[in-house]
Each structure stands twice: as structure tokens, then as C-alpha cells.
Amino acid sequence: MLERALRDLAVPVALLDGADPHLPVVWVNRAFEVSTGYDAADARRHQRDPVPPGARRPDALLAVREAVRERREVSQTLSLRRADGSVYTCLVHLSPLVGADERITHWIAALQDLTEQLSHDAAQSALVAAERRERRALGIVAQVSDLLMDVDDRMTPLHEIASLLTDTIVGWARFYVNDGGLRPADGIDSHHPPSGKGRRHGAPARVAEQGGDQTPGPDSVQLLLDGVKERPVDLPLDGWFPRGSASSWLAAHAHAQGPHELVDGPSRAAVFPVSGRRRVLGLLVVLPRAGRGLDGLEQSARTVLELTARRVGLVIDNARLYDREHRLAETLQRAMLPQQADVDGLDVWTYYAPNAENVQVGGDWYDVLQISPDVVGVVIGDVVGHDVEAAAAMGQLRSVVRSYAYDITTPGPVLERVDQLVAGMRIPRSAGLVLSTLTRSAGSWRLEYSRAGHLPVLHVRDGAVVALMEGGGPLIGFGGEGRSTQSLALDPGDVLVYYTDGLIERRDRGLREGIDALTEVVGGVTARDSAGIGEEILSRLADHPEDDVAVVVVRVPDPRDHLERGRSPRRRRWSLPSEPASIGRARHAVVRTCHAWDMPNAANAELVVSELVANAVLHGFGHVSLQLYDTGDGLRIEVEDGNPAPPIATDGHPGRVGGFGIKIVERLADWGWRPSARGKLVWAKVRPGDLPPAGR
């Protein structure tokens, strides 16, 4: 019964002769024969070691031999060879059988086949490794998304994403932008207009001796840039390409920038297209740690790289699209605003800030008109809405009011004619405005005004503020019963503040509370020039506006201004058109500012601002922004325009006048420049005073 039980046991068992030091096999059961393919005679004939034949794993064999010498049980995992030559892994349990005389008569070996268990364990390990790779991939994609969240902050660096990829899945990574040709990209720069297809590059191929029988390889990078290829490609860093091609330039740049252990020898880079909606915007170039291009990337890593390139391309495209729409909105708004010239006998300051945060086009506007040498017209208005229709209505109204104001100088009759014309034009948006004229007579000024559903102008005299509520009427287009005109004699030092509701209205503050807040601020103003008054108003009320903001400050000069100086905000700003007349306006602005800030002899500052604004007008584009700051030890001038190209100091232009502007600025001030959201900003720190002597 015992023999039958051992013979039919499902566990492979072999009985070994303990009297022989080689432990020959004397008996095996059926399970052993099925598992190994050997019967007892075959096992004994092929036996080499005191364990079943075909055993491997030398350390395990040594452990078995040591246990046999020490006459103790042992269990070891061994690799055994079957009769058919296949190798399988099993756990061998070897136990001694001791006779009556305390001698070992036999050893019994039981085999446990681990093939299925190891396969299951390997499958589980592979599954765990795959899940780990997927979690890592998802984590990397999430981090990339987080880095791309702040694309509005135009300093979001692409090199942070490249560094993340380098730290996690590749040996080296770099982004390149395709703006009329490849260039390394350190950040998402929405201000480079997208070009068409990638142009051919003039950079030479990587320096090497080319054999006479070698034929340049295809320009696969150019095919990616042109959209001919859509899938990532391999780029051999030691390959031969057409001289001056995109592949040649990129291979040379990657070889120069990549880690030496990855670029030396026959290394290949993997190049992924960074695609926008209509064109390839750039490339993501990576060097796998194995240096074998796409073949050196795990599938999960390749998926991460493809997703990253796709997301970066979409974000760059969205940033550029948003920036173009944003610029279009702001340009359209500013194009519809007049550019005020200096008014003889009055100190006038204007300010306009469009609410283009959501790419909206608003309907606020102002006008300062020199109707005649002694008559000045001031208009401020607001069309309901924030869209192109509102802007179009604003443009129509501005033109109509301008035309009639030059023909009829009394505000009420002008608005009556505007009502009649607007009713016939069927302008779809309602609008409110204030039209006023200031007439000079015998050295004094008289104000006439009429309101059409707009906020009242504030009149300030000796710190007392009065809202000019009279002369009111319905919105433009609804004044069928005539418009009234009110008048007010102005004294030297009087101030008029025109504004739109964006200055005072907030979600948590209504118009009445806003007017009260503005009245309080205006009553406490200590500046004695219109720019200073405007700056103080803005500093107190124009934080985080929720609508367009338009402000016009008109002040009647006071002969006592040069004797009495009030505290004045130490900042001034002007928006100037890109035309030669702005140079004169800027010079007058800096002279008036230096006077308000008690900076005697502003000759240096006047000359510096003249040169900077002239450069912006001649070489820039778009509006010119001028800002002045009192730094405590001098005057800081900042001039911003839409041209991102840096200023260059030259020794003049042969054959024509000019070219010395920056040289003049260098002599009179410390200066520099930096990129800005619009283009560039040039600054100069100047200490107003006498011109430096010659030779210094």
C-alpha cells in the first residue's frame, strides 16, 4: 500500500541510494517520469550530481552538497533539464532516511515545479511595472499641464517642461520654435508671429570629414516642419544631411547642447513635431538614455512625449491666437480714440485703459478738440456693451459729435442735431456723453456743457468739489424736446474731471457710492498739475477696473503755481500716437512734470525723452507709452513701443542726418531696455540739471 501510494503520488519523488556518495537514483514515481521524462534507469544513466540530472544554479548545488555532507535536510531552487532538453525551475526538497543503526540508507528527493508560479509572478510583476509606468506617465502629463496653466504669464518657460522630461524619462530634452526658421525656445513667446513653413537654415552641418562616396540622408526634420511627416522621426547626430538643411542645423545644435555621454558615437535623437491647428509650430527633441532614438524609448515614455508635444503646441497656438485677438481689441479701441494735442492756455491730461482682459471691444471714448484758438471742446462718452457693435457705434457717434462741434460751438444745439442724425442712422446701441466747450475771453475761461445721460463732470475749486448736475437729459437719440446748455465761469486753478463709469463702479459698489468716493478723492488732491491730479485719482480708484476707464482732467493754470507747490504723485503716464508730433508732446510733458516735482533745470531730461520717443516713433510701431517716475535721486523715464527689436547705439548713419540718439542718451543718463508684453521698454535714469561739460 505504501509503495502504491508513493507511486501514484502527484508530487514527483525520487529515491536515492545513501550508501553511494554519488547518491544514484534507485526509484522514481510516475509523477517524476511525467515531469522530467526520465524513468529510474534513465535518471541513473544521465546523472552527474547527487540531484536529478540537468541541475543548474552552482550556488544552490554547493548548498545541497554541503547539506548532504552534514546529513541534514535541504531545500533549494534548481533549474533542471528534462529529457526533451527543455529547462524548467523547481524547488527540490532532499531528506535523509536513517536506518536502525543510525546510518543513512537513502535520500528522498521531492520536486515542486515552479514554472506556473514563476509565470504568474512574472506576469504580476510585469503588470505592476506597467501600472507603475502608467502612473508615472500620468504624473508627468499632470505636471506638464500644471506648468502650462500659467501661459498668460508670458514667462512660462518651456525649459521647465524639458527639465521635467530630462529628470524622469529621457537623458536630454529641448524645445525649438519654428518662427521662419528653428530657434531654441526657453519660454512660450506669444509675441513672435507664426510664420509659414520652416525655412531652410543656413547653419552648416556638424564639422566632420565627409567621404567622397557618402550620400546625404533625407532632410526628415524639414519634412516634419512642412507637415509632410506627422509621426516622430529619428535624427542621427553623426549622420550626413544636405548642407544648410534643417536636419543638419538641428543635429549640430543637439550635438553641441546634449550631454557628452549621449552624443558621442552613433547616437540618435528622437524628434517630435509640436503642432498647432494649421501648421507645425516647433519641435521637441529628446535623447533617450540609451542613445538609440525612438527605439530607446519605452512605449509609455513615447506616449508621454507625444502628448507633451501636442499639448505644448495647442497652448502655444492658443496663446498666440489670444494675443492676436487681445491686440486687435486694444488696437481697435485705441484707434478710435483721438490723440490730443497740446491746448494753448489749459493744462490737459487724458487717460484711457481698455478692458481687453476678455478680448472685448468697448465703447468708451473721449475727445479734446482745438475748435479755434480760443475755443476748446471736451467730450467723454460711453456706448452700452463690450463688443464690436458697441465699438462701431462709438466710432460713428465720435465722428458725428466731432463734425457738429466744429460747426456749432454751443453744446445743447450740437446734441440736438446728434439726436436727429442718430435717430435716422438707427444706431443699435444707446449711449451717454458729456459735451463741453471752454472759451477764452480776456484771459479767463468760461465753461459751457450739456449732458446726455452721462455721469456729471466734477468741478474743483480750492478743494471744494461740485458735481455739475445741471444741463442733463436722456441718452443720445432720445432727446426729442431739445437739449439745455449750462455755463460756469472758471477761475485760475479750477479743475474739471471727466470720467466714465469704469473708474468708479464695481460689483460691490454702485454708481452713487462710486461718485461719492471720487468726490472725496478729488477733494483731497494736492497736485497742482493735471497729470498729477489724474495720477492721484487713478492710484486711489483705478485698481482692478471691471470696465473701460476713460478720464480727462482739465486745469486752468494759476499764476501762483510757480510759488506754491503741492505734494504731487511721483508718477506720470501718457499714451502717444506713433507720429512726429508726439515728440513735442513728450518734451512738454517732462518739462511740466519736472516743474511739478520741483526739479529745476530739466534740460537733460527733456533731451533724453526727446531722443527715446523719437526712436520709438521712427523705429517702433503701435502707440508709444511714456512713463515718468521720481526715484528720489533723479528722474526715471520709460518709453514702450510695439517693436521687440532692441535699440542699438551707432555713430550716425552715413549720408543722412541722425543716428546719434542713443549716444546722446548714454552721455546724459544710465539706460537700458527689456522685453515687454507689447514689444520692448527702454528706460533711462537721468538727474535733471545742466548739460555735462564737453569731453565728459
Image: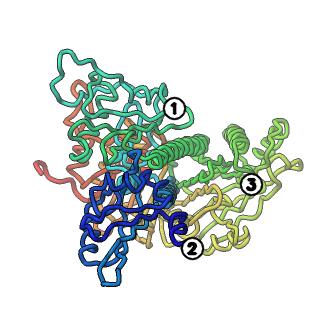
How far apart are the alpha carbons under marks 3 and 1?
Answer: 55 Å
| Tag nearer the camera, 3 or 1 | 1
* Horizontal and vertical percent position of residue 461: 59, 70
Q: Nearer the viewer, residue 101 or 542?
A: 101
Answer left or right for 534 relative to 203.
right
How far apart are the alpha carbons under marks 2 and 1?
Answer: 63 Å
Q: Which mark is residue 450?
A: 3
* Horizontal and vertical percent position of residue 660: 24, 39
Q: Nearer the viewer, residue 548 or 259?
A: 259
Rendering quarter of residue 239 = top left
Q: Is residue 186 visible?
A: yes
Q: Is label 3 in a helix, a strand or a loop?
A: strand
Outermost residue to the left: 695
Q: Residue at x 41, y 28 (%)?
A: 198
Q: Is residue 370 visible?
A: no
Outermost residue to the top: 213
Q: Residue at x 21, y 15 (%)?
A: 213
Residue where numbered disc 1 is placed: 279
Where, quadrant-wise, is the N terminus in this rendering?
bottom right
273 vs 609: above or below: above
Q: Earlier in the sequence, mark 2 or mark 1?
A: 1
Q: Earlier in the sequence, mark 3 or mark 2?
A: 3
Outermost residue to the bottom: 101
Q: Which mark is residue 462?
A: 2
